[in-house]
């Protein structure tokens, strides 16, 4: 592409979807918007962050190759990738994927990326167990969020905004409401740029609470398992249509010496849950690798029904002593940081 044609690439037409051009060290990709093909600037964003409307959590998506110099990491990646069905997200019609409500200040590229993610969510439906296709609100201002949210969801929003949900920190939060009916996902965004990782983490991870089946007994389960498995559902969803498992590895280094038994406080505790999520997502990913995603979800659903959890119950499901499981998780986590 010539430099002259790059002058208005953000709104100019292009000829072939997927075409990539690099101008002045900036990358642009040709994407479909409505009936047109236009150039969209590719933005390298910060690590993904996601949070749910009830508890708040952080996710940092990162594509992971299926090969690794570390044997345990390579084994886990191979087992995870083997669980991904062969899919083509481009074959999913937009009419089936849900509704996008975007503020006028939002870069059109964010709408395209959100639609792609909604196709992945549609393909993950056997796992996600959505009642209805979601509604996604893409916003750059608080008034827009508050005015649009109440049009689609009756869940309480009086708490918003708070100290943690300011637009200046848009990449640190997101929230979802009406999960058990028509989910309404709020994704805060800047007025320019397309932070793909942030959108993926927000939408994919928040909806991960659905197959876990939040209920009165959730607080009786270890928070690392609830939050961690929710994150793994998000990883699975964002991996559909790709040839690798999309790995979220949120600062595991500082949690390597923390015992799982030391972080089993309520999943609703949003002020001190870092290791519960960071170590929990690694531990849950290891469980899913060796047991499978569907059996693991069935297991946590049974725990939700009884409200009874113990290391012995978990060991029976795993087929190994709990201490051995924790040791293997730490070895896996150490491999991820190497």
Image (cartoon, rainbow, N blue to C red):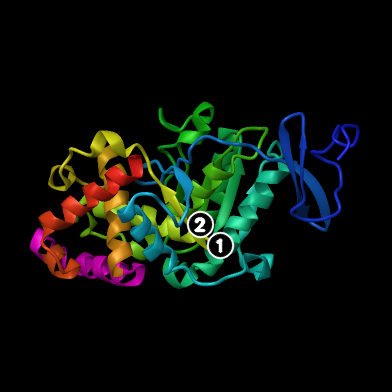
Query: Which secondary structure dominates the residues rendered in magenta?
Result: helix
Residue 106 appears left or right of 234: right
Question: Quick check: can you spot residue 223?
Answer: no
Name the residue tied to disc 2: 238
Residue 304 appears left or right of 195: left
Farthest residue to the front: give it: 69
Name the residue tied to disc 1: 120
Query: In this view of the protein, which residue sits in the foreground, 20 or 53?
Result: 20
Could you tell me which residue is drawn at 12 percent across and 58 percent down? 322
Query: In this view of the protein, which residue sits in the foreground, 82 or 219?
Result: 82
| x then y, percent, for residue 110 | 65, 45
**Cα distance, mark 1 to mark 2?**
7 Å
| x then y, percent, for residue 203 | 50, 51
Q: Is residue 163 above or below residue 107?
A: above
Q: Where, quadrant-wise, is the N terminus in this rendering? A: top right
Q: Where, quadrant-wise, is the C terminus in this rendering? A: top left
Residue 11 appears left or right of 265: right
Please provide the residue range marked out in magenta: 292-312
Q: Is residue 49 magenta?
A: no
Could you tell me which residue is drawn at 34 percent across and 59 percent down? 76
Dot 2: element:
helix
Could you tell me which residue is drawn at 51 percent across and 54 percent down? 184
């Amino acid at each position: 592409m010539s430099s002259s044609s790059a002058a208005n690439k953000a709104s100019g037409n292009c000829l072939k979807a997927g075409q990539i051009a690099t101008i002045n060290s900036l990358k642009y990709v040709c994407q479909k918007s409505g009936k047109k093909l236009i150039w969209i600037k590719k933005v390298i964003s910060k690590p993904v962050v996601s949070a749910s409307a009830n508890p708040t959590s952080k996710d940092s998506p990162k594509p992971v190759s299926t090969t690794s110099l570390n044997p345990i990491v390579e084994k886990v990646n191979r087992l995870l990738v083997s669980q991904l069905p062969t899919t083509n997200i481009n074959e999913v019609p937009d009419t089936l994927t849900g509704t996008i409500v975007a503020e006028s200040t939002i870069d059109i590229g964010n709408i395209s990326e959100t639609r792609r993610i909604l196709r992945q969510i549609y393909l993950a439906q056997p796992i996600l167990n959505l009642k209805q296709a979601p509604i996604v609100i893409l916003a750059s201002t608080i008034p827009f969020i508050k005015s649009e949210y109440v049009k689609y969801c009756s869940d309480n929003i009086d708490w918003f905004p708070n100290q943690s949900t300011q637009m200046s920190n848009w990449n640190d939060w997101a929230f979802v409401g009406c999960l058990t009916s028509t989910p309404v996902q709020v994704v805060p965004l800047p007025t320019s740029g397309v932070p793909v990782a942030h959108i993926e983490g927000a939408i994919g991870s928040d909806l991960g609470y659905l197959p876990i089946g939040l209920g009165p007994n959730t607080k009786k389960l270890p928070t690392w398992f609830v939050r961690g498995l929710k994150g793994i559902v998000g990883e699975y969803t964002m991996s559909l249509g790709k040839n690798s498992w999309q790995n979220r590895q949120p600062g595991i280094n500082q949690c390597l010496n923390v015992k799982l038994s030391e972080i089993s406080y309520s999943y609703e505790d949003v002020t001190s849950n870092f290791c519960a999520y960071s170590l929990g997502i690694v531990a849950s990913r290891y469980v899913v690798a060796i047991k499978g995603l569907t059996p693991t979800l069935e297991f946590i659903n049974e725990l939700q029904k009884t409200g009874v959890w113990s290391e012995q119950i978990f060991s029976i499901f795993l087929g190994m002593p709990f201490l051995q499981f924790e040791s293997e998780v730490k070895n896996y986590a150490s491999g991820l940081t190497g």
